Image (tube, rainbow, N blue to C red):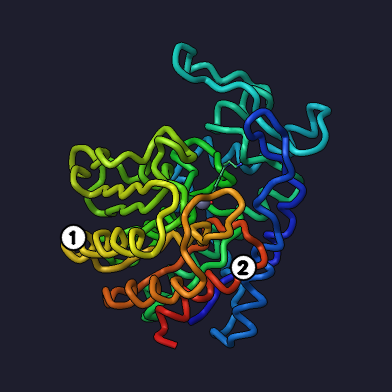
Amino acid sequence: MKTVHSPLHAGHAGQLELTAGRLLPGFEVPERAEIIKARIEAVGLGPILAPTAQTLDVATRVHRPDYVDFLARAWDLWIAAGYEGPALPFVWPTRGLRDDLRPDKITALLGYYSFDGGSAFVAGTWGAIESSYAAALTAADLVASGERGAYALCRPPGHHAGVRAAGGYCYLNNAACAATRLRDAGAARVAILDVDFHHGNGTQEIFWTRGDVAVVNLHGDPATEYPYFLGAADERGVGPGEGFNLNLPMAAGADWAIWGEALTTGLSAIRAWGVDALVVSLGVDTWEGDPISHFRLKTSDYPRIGAAIAALGLPTVFVQEGGYAVAAIGDNAVGVLEGFEGR
Ligand code: OKP
Ligand code: ZN
């Protein structure tokens, strides 16, 4: 399988994240991608290609154009305002406040365009966002032109990013963009299977009203797990999208017996939808040793995930999402890809 990856991800480093009363060094570190890349090379998974040049056309159809423009300018605005260090929001236009005021100040814009304090901007953030997006589109192009599978080694991840909101280490929704590119290339219907520990709230929001891109999410129950405010089992989509969103939340502690059963349920739904192509939001923070997540998958379970996905027989784009146990992330992520390849 071909991997698409850019060294520009490394410029997105030294972020801080706001968590439970603390400003902590970000868990979403450059080493994550470097360790996955090293594992791909060690097992000889296949060539690692640079992303091809991409316009922001797909990004501005998946997201609001003013949001994409903000992502590109946020760091420069922060510096121009005299701040230094990672840019983070501290006030949000939530319930009871006006959503139609958008003061032209970077401190206001950071909150206007985010839903939490987990997606910081540093000097190299936009370059990394663009390269991650381009990797997802390039992998989709490989699959659209006949490859059975392709892997976008994306960093930063994307599944929490909504129509106009960054959050949860995410900025552009790479998986949603890959699905859109597959639709543009002629797939009438696409499914997104999100196996990251955290609910892909951004992906759900983006396709909520649509029947042409169906979304399945396997994740920690929002009653106790981030992002808390989306991801319950009763969220099924609306209008033409009704019945094309399937949430499979699980309590903390889920192991292969429980998680594998939810995967079977999700794959059955994808079969029933009769889609032409698949995008997998591939988070491996479901691993038993993940520092911020609470499932109990073992390294030996990841090839089983890949094999079960391969049994769908669909052209498949894998897009990297989470996974924060840095030393294990290569074995786990590449394990899925090897399982898909039947190796
Ligand atoms: C991004 B992805 C950590 C609390 C949770 C945000 C998690 C974002 C996960 N102490 N912070 O879905 O892997
Ligand atoms: Zn996650």
- The answer to whether the residue labelled 2 contacts the one labelled 1, judged by CB atoms less than 8 Å apart, is no
In the image, farthest residue toward the top: 96
Circle 2: residue type: Ala
Provide the residue designation for mark 2: 328
Picture residue at 80% right of the left edge, 34% below the top: 79
Picture residue at 52% right of the left edge, 16% below the top: 101
Asked if ligand 1 lies within 8 A of label 2, the reply is: no
Residue 50 coordinates in the image, percent (x, y): 61, 73
Picture residue at 61% right of the left edge, 60% below the top: 131
Q: Which of marks 2 and 1 is nearer the N terminus?
A: 1
Q: Quadrant of residue 259?
A: bottom left
Picture residue at 70% right of the left edge, 61% below the top: 8
Q: Quadrant of residue 236?
A: top left
Where disc 2 sits, the SS reads helix
Q: Is residue 142 above or below residue 19?
A: below
Q: Residue 273 carries which label?
A: 1
Q: Is residue 53 left or right of residue 273?
A: right
Q: Is residue 330 left or right of residue 163?
A: right
Q: Identify which residue, 317 or 116, lies in the foreground.
A: 116
Q: In this view, does 7 lie above or below 68?
A: below
Q: Is residue 328 left or right of residue 278?
A: right
Residue 92 coordinates in the image, percent (x, y): 56, 22
Can residue 61 be seen here? The reply is no
Residue 177 coordinates in the image, percent (x, y): 44, 55
Where disc 1 sits, the SS reads helix
Residue 161 coordinates in the image, percent (x, y): 49, 43
Q: Identify which residue, 341 or 191, lies in the foreground.
A: 341
Circle 1: residue type: Trp
